Amino acid sequence: MPFRTLREHLAKAMLAVGLPVGAAVSAQPIRLHPENPRYFEWRGRPLVLVTSAEHYGAVLNRAFDFERYLAALQRDGMNYTRVFTGAYVEPQGAFGIERNTLAPAAGDYLSPWVQVRPMPDAPPVHDLENISGEYLDRMKAFLASAARRGVVVEITFFSSTYGEAQWQVHPFNPRNNLQRIDVPEWKRLHTTEAPEQLQLLQEKLVRTLVRELRGFDNVFFEIQNEPWSDNPIVVETLNPLLANANVYPNVVEIPAPISVAWQRRMAAAIADEQREREHPHMVAQNVSNFRLPVRDDDLVPGVSIVNFHYAHPEAASWNRGLPLAFGYDESGFSGREDTPYRVGAWRFVMAGGALFNNLDYSFSVGHEDGDDTTNVAPGGGGPELRRQLGVLSRFIHSFDLATLGPMDDVVVRAPGVVPLVLGTQGHQYAVHLLGRGPTNLELRLPAGTYRAEWLDPRSGEAGPVETIRVDRQTTSLRSPEFASEAALRLIVE
């Protein structure tokens, strides 16, 4: 939209959510729950973030109608989205995505930096010393609209570069910016081996956004997307029996020390900008793909959220000792069918995860309602998957999250299925069963009377409801028939 119109839109949107235009407010932004830091608290309520959202270009792609997009998320019960700042952008066709919101058409790329022409007939380049006012206005309008619709936004500052095609359009490529900073190796862009002048400009972008977005309660920041991609260290082979075992997607990778050190520098810049704030925004760190028992030296200071991509449930369950929230920050590359993404979401959340984000390729320019189900891409998405994820969101939020935690000893035996249980001893239990039903659950519960409510995770249809009385060490409960999964809500009456 035109600059003047965007300014007017921003003012109206911010006033609609009670944010004074151009001023900070003291509202508590989303944070770790003070009683149970494995989950979030936002606007006074415990929260798990569940979504199936676009491919991170909602702000940087001028052609993308973010109002329609956010309305679609709200309509479908999604409460979270992730956006890139524009410090990384993709060329057309990257990763086999036909209609990629992160690959704007010519003229639609809204850079976080002012773009100038060094010569009258030359193409525009980024002035890395000057943040774009138009960009900040669009970012603020997006955040205000999301806040009004109950959507939390993760803002990812930087990303790995991945390949030469991405480097050719990268703002930090000296051919694409006014400063012409020599970068001897693009794989070192986000490490302590990057030129010092470039690191200072990276810090400047971080500081500016942290400062400019201080008034929004629906924001948290992530330092870098997939930092292991450009500088990987392999720490686990998932299936060593494969013929070509030590390559993606069969290896767990973490970033090299020079990458983690650079992230510490960016985290210090965030902390410095927020040092006098009563209510600072949370910081997330994307540590690994798949799963990882996280060590103290894997994390940078001040991190509240530990994000994984293509996560296994172990990414949450192996790290229960850390008083942090764990996120399944990106899913995809598992075909177009809904099942792997739905099941992955349920298993991660039921293992104790606090955040799930599916890459939903049904959102594209002109299809901001999320109905582009023919988009060629390495993943799926669409209205039906979002409906299914809404079932998960309603299920998990039906429990008292302030006291909920993993309880591995509740299901003593469950033939034919793999159970995951969250609960509060003697009060509430959430159970997910993966496998073939029916099965006889042998449960170890405190004495009392319980209401057992079955749920189909795919359809959302309620199953049998019964009352069970527990007066001995273990109690049996027979499940209904199910093809692959079932959910159970056990509440003390």
Image (cartoon, rainbow, N blue to C red):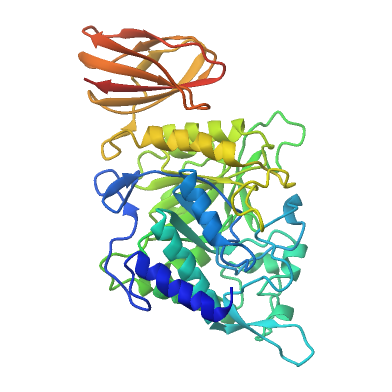
Up the image or down, 145 lies above or below 20; here it is above
Residue 169 x/y as whole percent: 73, 70
Tell me what residue is drawn at x 40 percent, y 59 percent: 147
Tell me, yes or no, if residue 131 can be seen here.
yes
Tell me what residue is drawn at x 48 percent, y 46 percent: 75
Locate residue 324 relative to residue 194 in the image: left or right.
left
Locate residue 492 relative to residue 387 in the image: left or right.
left
Furthest-bottom residue in this view: 120
Locate the N terminus by quadrant.
Answer: bottom right
Q: Nearer the viewer, residue 50 or 159?
A: 50
Residue 223 x/y as whole percent: 50, 62
Residue 243 x/y as whole percent: 77, 32
Tell me what residue is drawn at x 69 percent, y 80 percent: 182
Furthest-right residue in this view: 121
Q: Nearer the viewer, residue 87 or 43?
A: 43
Locate residue 174 relative to residue 75 in the image: left or right.
right
Quarter-wise, where is residue 230 in the image? bottom right
Tell me, yes or no, if residue 257 can be seen here.
no
Up the image or down, 484 lies above or below 308; here it is above
